[in-house]
Amino acid sequence: MTDKIMFINTQGFQNKKDQLNEIVKTNQPMVLAIAEHFQKNKDLLSFIEGYTVRSSFCRELKNERGGIAIFVRNDVECKPREELDVYCQKKAFEVTTVEIPSINLVVSAMYKPPSSSRTKFYSNLDSLLETLKSDTDKKHIIAGDFNIDLSQNKSTNEVMQKNGFNSTLSESTHDYGACYDNFIVDFEPRKARVMRGKFDKISDHHPIELIIGSSKAKKDTNSAP
């Protein structure tokens, strides 16, 4: 089964479960990361057949929206990276992380609300990437809705390149025509794409998918960008 990561800004969860189940049944991702699930506790994030929530962030108050979660297929060994939760900031830099030990892969899900500070985002992203790159024997993926077009944003690119990371997508992922959803990686995946199938879209964001493939060498983080 192909090692693939999917990310979807669902803009809700309880009313999207049937659609999510159809998407994962068709695509069978190893990891499904979602943003804006709108749930106030982890126990409400269930009923995706064959998958379990292994790490999440929820805004505690009712109707606060936001939030992120990582579902992992039940046949995949996984462990939460709870020590990285220190970087999560409600309504500013929402992030949660898991590790797949069998393939030395660390996957984070991230959500940056549109009204939150970009300056703080750059600083927080820099801190997170600095920590991630210290795990030199692992590959890293950050799947998220950044509400910034990473392919066009100079400040974000400087932060990524400084730490040996880059984004994978440049085409539109949102109804407004912007590339808000993306994968940040420190290795060369086989493929990344925006999913534009008739039944894939469940909000004003298109799902995105990254296929890991045969693991190529990681980028040399000490080389010039």
Image (cartoon, rainbow, N blue to C red):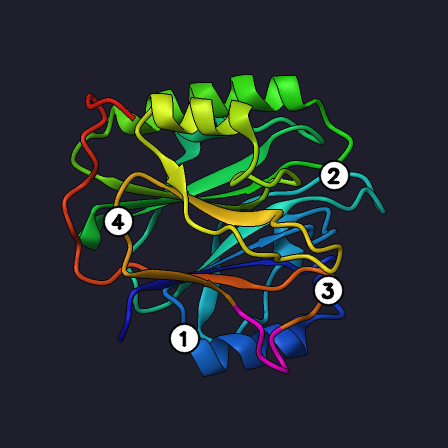
Circle 3 residue: 203
Q: Position of residue 23 (x, y in %)?
A: 54, 77
Q: Secondary structure at mark 3?
A: loop
Which of disc 1 and disc 3 is earlier in sequence? Answer: 1
**What amino acid is found at the position of numbered circle 4 in the picture?**
Glu
Does the CB distance between marks 1 and 4 fall below 8 Å?
A: no
Q: Nearer the viewer, mark 3 or mark 1?
A: 3
- Looking at the image, residue 139 sits to the left or right of residue 191; the answer is left
**Residues shaded magenta:** 195-200
Question: Mark 4 near mark 3, Cβ–Cβ under 8 Å?
Answer: no
Task: Pick whichever of labels 3 and 2 is earlier in the sequence.
Answer: 2
Amino acid type assigned to the residue bearing label 2 in the image: Glu
Quadrant location of the C terminus in the rendered image: top left
The residue at which mark 4 appears reads as 188
Of tags 4 and 3, the one toward the viewer is 4
Labels 2 & 1 near each other (Cβ < 8 A): no
The residue where tag 1 is placed is 28
Q: Position of residue 135 (x, y in %)?
A: 23, 29
Q: Kindly identify the residue that appears in the image at 61 percent across and 30 percent down.
A: 93
Type of the residue with mark 3: Ser
The residue that mark 2 highlights is: 60
Q: Is residue 204 magenta?
A: no
Q: Are marks 4 and 2 in contact (CB under 8 Å)?
A: no
Disc 1 residue crowd, few under 14, some 14–19, many 20+, Cα 10 Å: many
Q: Residue at x 75, y 55 (%)?
A: 176
Mark toward the start of the polypeptide (4 vs 3): 4
Tell me, yes or no, whether the highlighted magenta stretch contains residue 199: yes
**Mark pair 4, 3: CA separation:** 29 Å
In the displayed structure, would residue 119 be above or below residue 64? above
Local secondary structure at mark 2: loop
Q: Residue at x 42, y 49 (%)?
A: 168
Amino acid type at mark 1: Gln
